[in-house]
């Protein structure tokens, strides 16, 4: 009886391991198929100029300010625009050129409008740095006349 139960147990374990192996292989094949199909899908958002031109929809370019590239990227991704940013290192300070699909011109105009509003807003409410404030205070203190301290010596007997 024990031998029969042990044999059935071993047969069950073997079938179960076989099923899980097959299931694992099927899962891996499905995952690889998914990854392969995803890599062929067109990329969206920030990409290289080469990838942007490969899409065959024409490209336009515009120059953007270098201080807040991160803000521009965030807004462009919000609007779902495909773009590529190239840095011109020959000029000082460096200049950035943004390439985007020609068909996205309406979305880019909205991005530029929001971007410029944020940059102008930031410049208006920008506070002077702490070091600048300390320098101003130092100058004001230096301009004030110094008080002369009078020293009195009293002889006590």
Image: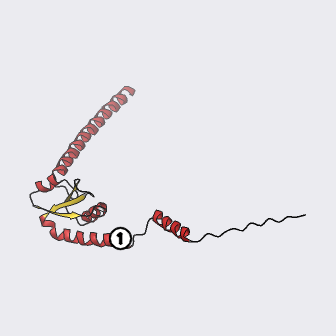
Relative to 49, 157 lies left or right: right
At which x and y percent is residue 39?
A: 18, 49
Q: Secondary structure at mark 1?
A: helix
| Residue depicted at x 20% and y 49% | 34
Q: Residue furthest top?
A: 3
Q: Nearer the viewer, residue 33 or 99?
A: 99
User: Quick one: label 1, few (<14), some, or many (20+) residues within 10 Å?
Assistant: few
Relative to 11, 57 lies left or right: left
| Residue depicted at x 31% and y 34% | 12
| Residue depicted at x 69% and y 68% | 149
The residue that mark 1 highlights is 123
Locate residue 157: give its quadrant: bottom right
| Residue depicted at x 24% and y 59% | 95
Q: Nearer the viewer, residue 123 or 140?
A: 140
At which x and y percent is residue 65?
A: 26, 64
Q: Nearer the viewer, residue 100 or 80?
A: 100
Quadrant (top left, top right, bottom left, bottom right) of the N terminus: top left
Q: Residue furthest right?
A: 157
Relative to 49, 120 lies left or right: right
Locate residue 17: give its quadrant: top left
At which x and y percent is residue 147?
A: 64, 70
Number of numbered discs: 1
Question: Taking 28 as reference, is 38 above or below it?
Answer: below
Q: Nearer the viewer, residue 85 or 42?
A: 85
Question: Taking 156 as reference, is 54 above or below it?
Answer: above
Locate residue 53: give its quadrant: bottom left
Task: Identify the colour scheme used.
Answer: secondary structure
């Amino acid at each position: 009886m024990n031998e029969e139960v042990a044999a059935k147990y071993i047969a069950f374990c073997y079938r179960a391991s076989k099923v899980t192996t097959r299931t694992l292989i099927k899962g891996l094949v499905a995952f690889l198929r998914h990854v392969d199909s995803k890599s062929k899908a067109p990329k969206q958002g920030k990409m290289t100029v080469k990838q942007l031109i490969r899409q065959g929809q024409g490209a336009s370019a515009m120059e953007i300010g270098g201080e807040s590239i991160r803000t521009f990227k965030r807004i462009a991704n919000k609007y779902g625009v495909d773009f590529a940013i190239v840095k011109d290192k020959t000029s000082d300070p460096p200049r950035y050129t943004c390439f985007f699909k020609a068909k996205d011109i309406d979305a880019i105009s909205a991005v530029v409008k929001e971007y410029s509003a944020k940059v102008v807003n930031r410049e208006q409410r920008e506070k002077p740095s702490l070091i600048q404030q300390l320098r101003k205070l130092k100058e004001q203190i230096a301009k004030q006349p110094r008080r002369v301290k009078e020293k009195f010596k009293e002889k006590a007997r």
